[in-house]
Amino acid sequence: MRITLLGATGRVGRLILASALQEGFAVTAIVRSPEKLAEVTDGENDAFVAGKLTLLQGSVLDAELLDTAVEGADAVVSALSTDGGTTLSDSVPLLIRAMEKHAVKRLIAIGTAGVLQSRAEPELLRYQSSESRRSLTRAAEEHHAMLQILQQSTLDWTLVCPTYLPEGEYTGVYRTERDFLPEGGKQISTGDTADFAFRLLSSDEWLHCRVGLAY
């Protein structure tokens, strides 16, 4: 399988990258700082040897670079995080345009539990409701903007929405729920979040929805 990966140097993205290479996938990743992936791209690294990695240095806001990255892909995975600005929401329309041009339908993106539906106030998203304990909602608003763009697209998208996300290893034991956070869920590790997102590349189970992730 050939995939395009955005956010490959992030906490979840680098784990998805390692899994993809270990499975022998061909990966094209757009990165600002290739040196951050030195431990993955080292020629002695078994994961790198197993797969084929192409790094394109630049910004996800570069439409031509996105076009190059997406061409020939079977699927796209976006593990982009928010940066305090609008890079996330600004990049999604450019990504969709490139995917439509090259007839790539499958998109898996990492979001946040803040954009899942609230159980207490179902007409609201969690970050808009009393369920949220955060006073700052900028990051959730960016993910909400991405969700709205995806919902209006013709892509086969899935938005993976982990709750509190500490660094942690893969366990394979976690709960999922469509459009809501699993009841009582408090956290989910980066390892298990990456595992779920990676498994979606071979599954059509969660198309056109958000998936809440928690232990």
Image: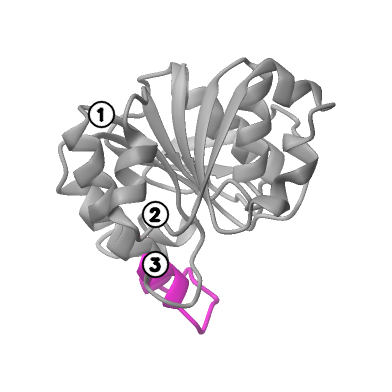
The C terminus: image quadrant = top right
Tell me which residue sits at (34%, 39%) in the image: 68
- Assess whether residue 135 is covered by the magenta stretch: yes
Q: Element under label 3?
A: helix
Label number found at residue 143: none
* Nearer to me, 83 or 176: 83
**What amino acid type is highlighted by mark number 2?**
Leu
Kindly report the distance in space between the C-alpha atoms of the residues bearing marks 1 and 3: 22 Å
Q: Label 2: which residue? A: 116
Side of 94 relative to 165 (left or right): left
Mark 2 or mark 3: which comes first in sequence?
Answer: 3
Mark 1 or mark 2: which comes first in sequence?
Answer: 1
Q: Which residues are magenta?
A: 127-143
Q: Label 3: which residue? A: 87
Q: Label 1: which residue? A: 105
Note whether 65 is above or below 49 in the view shown. below
* Nearer to me, 189 or 45: 45
**What amino acid type is highlighted by mark number 3?**
Thr
Mark 1 or mark 3: which comes first in sequence?
Answer: 3
The percent coordinates of residue 168 (x first, y second) are 78, 45
Residue 97 visible in the picture: yes
- Assess whether residue 64 is covered by the magenta stretch: no
Outermost bottom residue: 135
